Amino acid sequence: MRIACPFCGERENGEFTYLGDASPKRPNFAVDGGESPERVEDAFYDYVYLRDNVAGVMREYWYHGGGCRSWLVAERNTVTHEFISVTAAPGAGAASAVRAGE
Amino acid sequence: MADFSWNVQSPLQQALVPGRHGGAGTQVGVTLEEVRGVSLVQVMARRGRVAETIKAAKKLFSVEPPDTPRAVSGRNATLIWSGPDQFMVLSARQTGDQFAKLTAGFAGVASLSDQSDGRCLIRIAGSGARQALAKFSSLDLHDSVFPAGAAATTAVDHTAVNFWREPGSVDENAVFNMLVFTSFADSLWHTILDSCLEYGVQASVAHAA
Ligand SMILES: [Zn+2]
């Protein structure tokens, strides 16, 4: 299997590490915003632990540790292992950083 | 207590035995060199400061740093792409403080790290070089994919390597450069030498000019 890094080009998959689903967004509650502790805890529980088991195309984080050491977002079909697209994760290189999650 | 003194020495002090190895007769299919006396500095643009970093590099080296995996020759230095918005500056070690000079040139716009004693530069050339490299690198080194000046950050034997083809080195005279971590240099040298043996190897020490 080869993965096309947007910075390096096509490379063997051994140079990459898989993280997982790129869709969970880190909850962003205002400090003392009046949210109930249960609601905050539920939201974080969901963000940290709960994942969909997608059969089909999903967006995932991959890390090109054996190459340019950039975080990437790939669209991959989990059934066929086909990569539909691979792009730089937000904040790659010297680009502006953003909150975790897409 | 035993006397102790610091000696600067190559990580290939023991592994590199100059002379001919392997092959049949006097044939030399691969030349293997360790290039000593280099100055190497990693430059990484700070957040949102890419344009200023490019400008500073142009002022120092009269050339723009590569923004794709390439190595470019500039004034007294080769700039080698090492990732998005970062590159390495390779030059011959001078008597003056090269790192201080670069630190001043990139002040406030890029973060620098002196790697002069952290990496070992190995140079591979000759008619058998590509075939030997194919045994331990998964890069496609065909002329159409990896022309002169092409670069890659890749892994060899699970070890990070900065790899590039010497700008201007064409056809069967292609020269390939590898920057490897000094602590892995000894092990990688054996891997490289073993891969080259069947073509006949001339091993030597070179000094950066
Ligand atoms: Zn990459």
Image (cartoon, grey):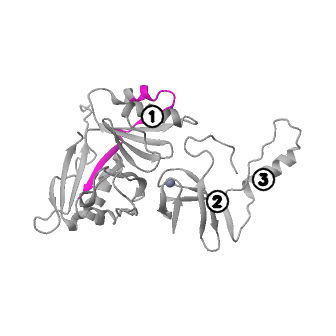
Seen at 21% across and 66% down, the residue is B199
Do the residues bearing badges 2 and 3 touch, measured as CB atoms within 8 Å?
no
Q: Which residue is mark 3?
A: A45
Q: Position of residue A81 (x, y in %)?
A: 60, 71
Quadrant where the N terminus of chain B is found in the figure: top left
In this view, the mark in front (3 or 1):
1
Separation (CA) of disc 1 from disc 2: 32 Å
Quadrant where the C terminus of chain B is found in the figure: top left
**Amino acid under disc 1:** Leu
Ligand 1 near label 3 (Cβ, under 8 Å)?
A: no
Horizontal side of B87 relative to A24 (left or right) equals left
Seen at 89% across and 44% down, the residue is A36
Does the magenta segment cover residue B72? no
Query: Are the numbered discs 3 and 1 placed on the same chain, yes or no?
Result: no
Secondary structure under tag 3 reads helix
- 10 Å neighbourhood of mark 3: few (<14), some, or many (≥20)? few
Query: Which mark, by number, is residue B19?
Result: none
**Of all residues shown, which one is farthest toward the bottom?**
A80
Q: Which residue is mark 1?
A: B112
Separation (CA) of disc 3 from disc 1: 40 Å
Q: Earlier in the sequence, mark 2 or mark 3?
A: 3
Residues in magenta, as a range: B102-125
Do the residues bearing badges 1 and 2 touch, measured as CB atoms within 8 Å?
no
Against B27, residue B9 (above or below) is above
**Of all residues shown, which one is farthest toward the left?**
B25
**Amino acid under disc 3:** Tyr
Against B189, residue B56 (above or below) is above
Secondary structure under tag 2 reads strand
Horizontal side of B204 relative to B135 (left or right) equals left
